[in-house]
Image: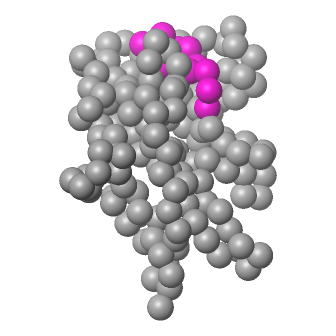
Amino acid sequence: MNKLLIKILFVIMTTTIIPLTNAKNIVPQFSDYPVKSVYAGITAKLDISDSSARMFRTRLNEALQQKADFAGEYVTTMWGCGASCRMYSFVSKRTGKLLQGGFGGEGNAEDVVATNPRSRLLVTQEEHTNYNYEVDSLTVRFYVLEKGKLTLIKTVKQAAAQEK
């Protein structure tokens, strides 16, 4: 089974299948954290008062041309920062401001794997590899956007499925 399929199955399993036996095993669902509406107004100009917004303004301006995919108003954007390095940021279509607390970068292998325009829930995944660069385990983290900040609400660790 290829690694991409393993990742997809893990994300589907952790975000859609709710174990009924133990409340600790229940994973957050997008429907648990709804937004009132998805922003459909005029897209704001990028606010470059933030030094990160200034530094990555080309990529962020491109992102603002896309539809909101997170928390009713944010567009998720990603760019490479090295061989296997990726950075994720979120820019508001309503205000043009960058959401503080992106993911990725050197020393942080957390990838954003699931968002929903109608939910404040965000799902990330971190792969843990062995010396052969094979995935040994995965850590999935669930964050909720509250008062302009991402708050970690749950962490699920699981051994990767073994190839046969």
* Residue at 29% across, 51% down: 22
Q: Is residue 37 above or below residue 89?
A: above
Q: Quadrant of residue 47?
A: top right
Viewer-proximal residue, 55 or 131? 131
* Residue at 46% across, 33% down: 153
Q: Is residue 55 above or below residue 78?
A: above
Asked if one can make out residue 44 in the rendered structure from this viewpoint, the answer is no
Which of the image's four quarters has the N terminus? bottom left
User: Which residue is outermost to the bottom?
Assistant: 164
Magenta region, residue range: 92-102
Viewer-proximal residue, 101 or 68? 101
Q: Main secondary structure of the magenta part?
A: loop
Q: Is 155 covered by the magenta stretch?
A: no
| Residue 164 rendering spot, x and y as whole percentages | 47, 91
Q: Quadrant of residue 93?
A: top left
Q: Quadrant of residue 89?
A: top right
